[in-house]
Image: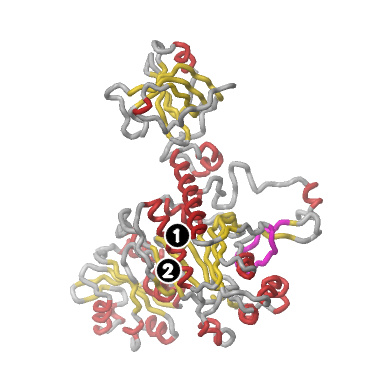
Amino acid sequence: MKFKKRTHTCGQLREENIGQLVVLNGWVAIRRDLGGVIFIEMRDRHGITQVVFEPSYNNESYEKAKKLRNEFVISIEGKVRKRPEGTENPALPTGQIDVMVDKLIILNYAETPPFALENNVEASEDLRLKYRYLDLRRSEMQKNLLLRHKMYLLTRKYFDENGFVEVETPVLMKSTPEGARDFLVPSRIHKGKFYALPQSPQTYKQLLMIAGLDRYFQIVKCFRDEDLRADRQPEFTQIDVEMSFADVEDIFEIVEGLMKIFFKEILNVDLNTPLPRLSFEEAMEKYGSDKPDLRFGLEMTTLNDLFANSQFRVFKDAVSNNEIITSLLAKGCGDYTRNQLDVLTDFAKKLGAGGLIWMRVKENELDAPIAKFLTDEEKKNIIAKMKAEAGDLIFILSGKQLKTLSIMGSLRLEMAKRMNLFSADAPPSLLWVTDFPLFEWDEETKRFYAMHHPFTSPRIEDILFMESNPAKVKARAYDLVLNGNEIAGGSIRIHDSDLQAKMFRALGISDEEAKEKFGFLIGAFKYGAPPHGGIAFGFDRLAMLFAGKTSIRDVIAFPKTSSGLSLMDNSPSLVDEAQLTELHIRIK
């Protein structure tokens, strides 16, 4: 059906447009029939304008408007007027005017939607995802996608102004399953062989540095076939960055410049730089996390020095086995009931703790199940070191260092919720975490894995330990953390083929396997690779945090569920047997 080109969007008209003839196109958001006058709130992605059908003004359009229902697509032509006194809507930018309709064209009819297309919708997420094209009509969702769009523009402008070149890297690449599980793509032409979808463009961006591009960035899709969570998707977006002749401070300067722009342009917050830094060891010991949330205090305290000569077996064993005794002070929580304490004990046990020691602080004494096993001196020292006062509550865990600190870190976050320490008005917490271990030991496979990836450079002074004591080696790696969320991670890379070979050997990768998986990169190192480093931002998580959401699904147009399903188009799905035959694949 023919319709006139719109003269304005539904969020554009103001008092200065009063008296003008206009054409609007959009959807019926709300219909109100007040018995003789029909009011329609007309919506497009720019906003809402109220249009009015009155029989005394134009009876033909009024009679036609009786057919309108929510989500009909319409085009109207009419005159802008000032709303009658007392009917203004200050909540809308267009709330001082409405449009008296001369002509109505119904462009398309709509069935009743399966849920109300309004903010704060009560529909289940599964229903919203099944009808995502309807969910995206809601202004809240469109606002999220427009914010994401703005972040794309800011990113490209910033990197362009700083001498970076955007280069697209392949989506079909070689499978190098060192890290997460690859998504594999069978080759029809090369029988029995497979491409992989990139977990990241890591090797390609290093090759671009070897190629002399000097400064590269890309907003890129990545793919990982791993178990999902609210903040993970099988396909996700990164801001990928690499720089030649760069050290850690150069990377930090570039990243902090981009974050200053995001904070100013999106949140209107002036970000102070340089950002604070914590080593991995400091972050774990004080906050029990390598992505600590510093919007509140609640620091953990290590107590090993207080129990060097303890006769309490739990603490004695921890000290003699070079394990950790860590504690947490919950101010004013000394009145917790036994039931509340049992719930917290179960919380710690579910995370892998053998148990949770708790102590109520009273006037110059500790009320605790283990109190009888401690000397008066030990009790006094606990109170003093933790700066505890009567009415406080102390928690203590002991065991293997990283596991125990991590459990206490989770308890720290749980207590922060219970103590209402999270404040919407708290300034954002943005910091660097540095000096990660280069390797992490896996008990199940009895081998070391790269904590970041196998191209991460060790600290120069630690190279001599790579074969004799890999656990001692620190990486030239860094993570950027916002409000307890890792939003970016990177490292200075290995650019020397001998050091790269040493890294592969430390990871249990034979020379033959390394050549098979990474021969192209190792070969490239031999032709003059510059020192280089970079970082990758988790763009979905970054957009989620700036939008004030708790799930990345709220800032992705067509996300998967937590089990990797697309409820809208029912993927993944079965494929025709002929397709499988052509790809030389048989399903057992």
**Which one is nearer the viewer's eye here, 444 or 80?**
80
Looking at the image, can residue 230 be seen? no
Residue 403 lies, with reference to residue 120, above or below; the image says below
The amino acid type, in three-letter code, at marker 1 is: Leu
Residue underneath mark 1? 258
**Residue at 59% of width from left, 41% of height from top?**
568
What x and y, as percent, mark residue 213? Answer: 60, 65
Question: Is 523 colored magenta in this rendering?
Answer: no
Quadrant of the rendered image containing residue 206: bottom right
Q: Is residue 38 left or right of residue 583?
A: left
What x and y, as percent, mark residue 162? Answer: 49, 61
What x and y, as percent, mark residue 230? Answer: 50, 54
Secondary structure beneath label 1: helix
Q: Which residues are magenta?
A: 172-185
Residue underneath mark 2? 432
**Residue at 33% of width from left, 28% of height from top?**
96
Mark 2 and mark 1 in contact (Cβ < 8 Å)? Answer: no
| Separation of residues labelled 1 and 2 (CA atoms) | 14 Å
Residue 298 lies, with reference to residue 47, above or below; the image says below
Question: Is 181 colored magenta in this rendering?
Answer: yes
**Residue at 44% of width from left, 39% of height from top?**
139
Residue 200 lies, with reference to residue 493, above or below; the image says above
* Mark 2 neighbour class, 10 Å CA radius: few under 14, some 14 to 19, many 20 or more: many
* Mark 1 neighbour class, 10 Å CA radius: few under 14, some 14 to 19, many 20 or more: some
Main SS, magenta residues: loop
Scheme of image coloration: secondary structure
Quadrant of the rendered image containing residue 370: bottom left
**Which one is nearer the viewer's eye here, 52 or 495?**
495
